Amino acid sequence: MKVLGFAGYSGSGKTTLLEQVIALLRAQGLRVSVVKHAHHRFDIDHPGKDSWRHREAGAYEVLIASDRRLALMREFEPPQQLGVHALLAELDHGVDWVLVEGFRHGDLPRVEVWRPPAPGQSPRPVHYPDDGHIVAVATDAPLPQPTALPILSLLDPQAVVQWMLEQGARFEYSPPSMESCE
């Protein structure tokens, strides 16, 4: 499987770009998985549903499965941060691409998604000059610092996918030893 990250500030267009990239890869018959980093508490379960009731009763894990999908919810006691490699290990390794949204400080190759701040927003410095894991920049604005990296248009997801496919061999994933996944 090939793994490529997309990282940038909130509101930079990461999710919109990934939605388009996923659809374009799927249209070519490729299987795509996504790992998304959340900075806040989130829930995929609904109060009152059986799985929610099981979790509320204290279950460590609740696995829900149907003929269409599977979801595993695991409670961390005490809270812990899993690294991106540990999360990748949870996925089906038979997919063609795994797109990772977030994990800006990880060691995976990634595209920096950058847009300048709107008036009144905090500055958004670019990270590509100091981050050797950034392999391209996706933007729809002039960059504040020059770069020799490929510049991809946020407005042309087909070109982003074309670049990904052309560069595919460099994104083949080789998991590190399990000790470094924790």
Image: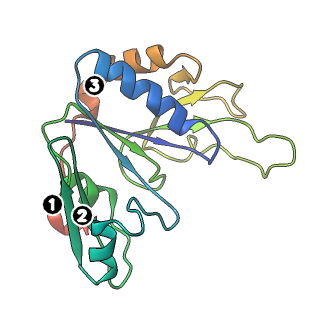
Q: Is residue 150 above or below residue 178?
A: above
Question: Which residue is more in the foreground, 54 or 139?
Answer: 54
Earlier sequence position, callout 3 versus callout 2 = 3
Name the residue beneath numbered marker 3. Answer: 168
Name the residue beneath numbered marker 1. Answer: 177
Question: Rounded to the nearest whole Å, what is the CA distance between mark 1 and mark 3?
Answer: 23 Å
Instruction: Choose top left, top right, bottom left or bottom right for residue 151.
Output: top right
Question: Rounded to the nearest whole Å, what is the CA distance between mark 2 and mark 1?
Answer: 7 Å
Q: Three-letter amino acid code at disc 3? A: Gly
Q: Position of residue 142 (x, y in %)?
A: 71, 25
Name the residue beneath numbered marker 2. Answer: 181
Mark 2 vs 1: CB contact within 8 A: yes
Q: Residue at image x 55%, y 29%?
A: 138
Q: Residue at image x 14%, y 43%?
A: 67
10 Å neighbourhood of mark 1: few (<14), some, or many (≥20)? few
Q: Position of residue 76 (x, y in %)?
A: 32, 77
Is residue 169 among what the camera can see?
A: yes
Q: Three-letter amino acid code at disc 2? A: Cys
10 Å neighbourhood of mark 3: few (<14), some, or many (≥20)? some
Q: Three-letter amino acid code at disc 1? A: Ser
